[in-house]
Image (cartoon, rainbow, N blue to C red):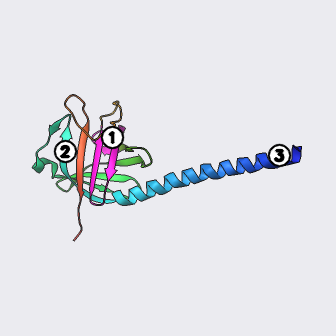
Amino acid sequence: MQPALLKFLFIGLILTLNGLVVTAADTKEEAIKKDRKRIEGTWRVVALEVGGNKSSDDDARKLTVVNGADGSWSLRSEGREISQGTTVIDPLKTPSTIDFTPTSGGGKGNLHQGIYEVKENTRKLCFTPPGHARPTEFVSQPGTEQILVTFEREVTK
């Protein structure tokens, strides 16, 4: 094969591979934007389990989370903000992963690793305290310290 043709094919291969990398990155960014849009809004906690211990429905329903399209969040108890922070999500993993870090309130600066599932008006989040491995399924069993939260979207009137 002639050197000029070989060089042309090599350059073409590099450009094609660069295009695939950009396409994969664009696809991930698009998936993140899509899920952030689906998560955006106010969500009421309807079920909460910590290490296999289920909170009362009344206690769980006192909590809401307001999610921004930029990945920010605010945790509220009976309408009063008790913590806020940021998230990093990867909706292309199975299950979808989330890392969140409080920037104020309890646990400020601690990284929590979790998984999430979002549907039209319901959402699940399972995560662990800092320093523990990311959960692989949506369960909270005794001795695991995993926290399982189920949310329903608050409908604005």
Mark 2–mark 3 CB contact (< 8 Å): no
- Taking the image as shown, residue 103 lies to the left or right of residue 28, namely left
- Taking the image as shown, residue 63 lies to the left or right of residue 89, namely left
Crowding near the residue tagged with mark 1, few <14, some 14–19, many ≥20 C-alpha atoms within 10 Å: few
Q: Which residues are magenta?
A: 102-127
Secondary structure beneath dot 3 equals helix
Q: Residue placed at 60% from the left, 52% from the top? A: 22
Q: Nearer the viewer, mark 3 or mark 1?
A: 3
* Residue corresponding to mark 3: 7
Q: Quadrant of the N terminus?
A: top right
* Residue corresponding to mark 1: 108
Please identify the quarter of the rendering in which residue 79 is found: bottom left
Mark 2–mark 1 CB contact (< 8 Å): no
Q: Is residue 59 above or below residue 40?
A: above
Q: Is residue 126 magenta?
A: yes
- Taking the image as shown, residue 42 lies to the left or right of residue 17, namely left
- Taking the image as shown, residue 101 lies to the left or right of residue 43, namely right
Total marks in image: 3
Amino acid type of the residue that numbered disc 2 sits on in the rendered structure = Leu
Rendered location of residue 18, percent (x, y): 66, 49
* Residue corresponding to mark 2: 48
Crowding near the residue tagged with mark 2, few <14, some 14–19, many ≥20 C-alpha atoms within 10 Å: many
Q: Is residue 136 magenta?
A: no
Q: Residue placed at 31% from the left, 56% from the top? A: 119
Q: Nearer the viewer, mark 2 or mark 3?
A: 3
